Amino acid sequence: MMDDPVLKIENLRTYFYSRSKQAFSRAVDGVNLVLEKGKTLGIVGESGSGKSVTALSVMGLVTAEPGVISGNIGLKNNGIQKNLLQDIEDYVKITNDNGRIAEVSKDNPGWQRHIDRILRGVRGKEISMIFQNPKVSMNPFSSVGQQIKEAIMLNTPINNPQEARQRTLYWLEKVKIDSPRLRYDNNPYGLSGGMCQRAMIAMALSSEPSVLIADEPTTGLDATIQSKIVSLLGELKSSVGVTTLLISHDIDVIKVLSDRVAVMYGGRVLESGPSTEVLAAAHHENHPYTAALLASIPTAQQIRAKSYLQAIKGDVLDTINLPTGCRFYARCRQVTEQIKKQCKYQEPELKEISTNHHVRCWRYFDA
């Protein structure tokens, strides 16, 4: 039985309009996720599966038309429950044509004002985010110390500049950045990628948020620095105990840091459950897509033998022209004759196959 969730995402839908194809892309299409207090939920999947768009939707940072169009994002902090998408449907109207989205009419200015009003006091305070590229995300004209200090003064009870400076140095030391007092005065472009990522982590944690979203925190770093950042995040998880939504292509990172994992493909969650169960290579109860992802990880034996890596055949799903059945059907290698028709023409629901382990696959319904 799950604990009372800090963050609960229900039926989240985020669509974008493709001007070249004159159609709507369902980047996130009915996603449900639950994040328990003090736990880490990892999200894995190929590029284009909807991982980062899910995170940006939670933060209210999707601004392209039409953006987030429906769903509920429940945030519970200090006994207070908030819906970060409350009344969002009032600003959106969807027109369907034979199951295809023909038009999405959205009052963008009204929607943006509404979201900003709801998320005032939430963004950066109750929910913080570590972005993929910290050098782009930080102000290039201000020192990292000043930026962290500003975040502390905006999002915590500390309003004394000297006290905020000391708190900034505390967090720079906490993330094990080299020479914290020296780095305080460095601008982002004066830091290496690893140092800049540590500074970004310090800024995100400095407001002591209820939820931390880490979007590809090791992307763009060399292998040695990646390993150090993963170790740092593991230590911070133990010492700070912040509830974390972790997004990564690197399944090994998810294995190390996550308590639970959700596997996304084509804007849907295809599997979710305990990370030790879902990401176990020898586990026999997996969605075919999860099994294919795990099989694509090179083993030590393959590296020594210099053998070819195992790829997932076929192309990543086009989220504009979605199939009527299972979204992974065209690439699946585990379809049997008994369920072939169902797989092709009818999408399965998430089915619980063991305690808190859900899979969206007709094989388990057939069994």
Image (tube, grey):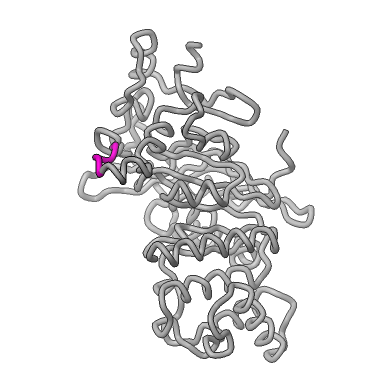
The stretch in magenta equals 306-310
Percent position of residue 108, x then y: 43, 57
Percent position of residue 204, x then y: 58, 69
Percent position of residue 228, x then y: 50, 65
Q: Is residue 178 above or below residue 45?
A: below
Query: Going by the image, does 288 lie left or right of 234?
Result: left
Query: Going by the image, does 85 lie left or right of 19?
Result: right
Q: Using the rendered view, name the quadrant where residue 290 is placed.
A: top left
Secondary structure mostly seen in magenta is loop
Q: Is residue 103 above or below residue 336?
A: below
Indicate the quadrant containing the N terminus: top left, top right, bottom left or bottom right.
top right
For the residue pair 112 and 187, the one nearer the viewer reads as 187
Q: Is residue 259 magenta?
A: no
What count of labels does the image hold? 0
Percent position of residue 259, x then y: 61, 45
Which residue occupies the extreme right position in the image? Answer: 79
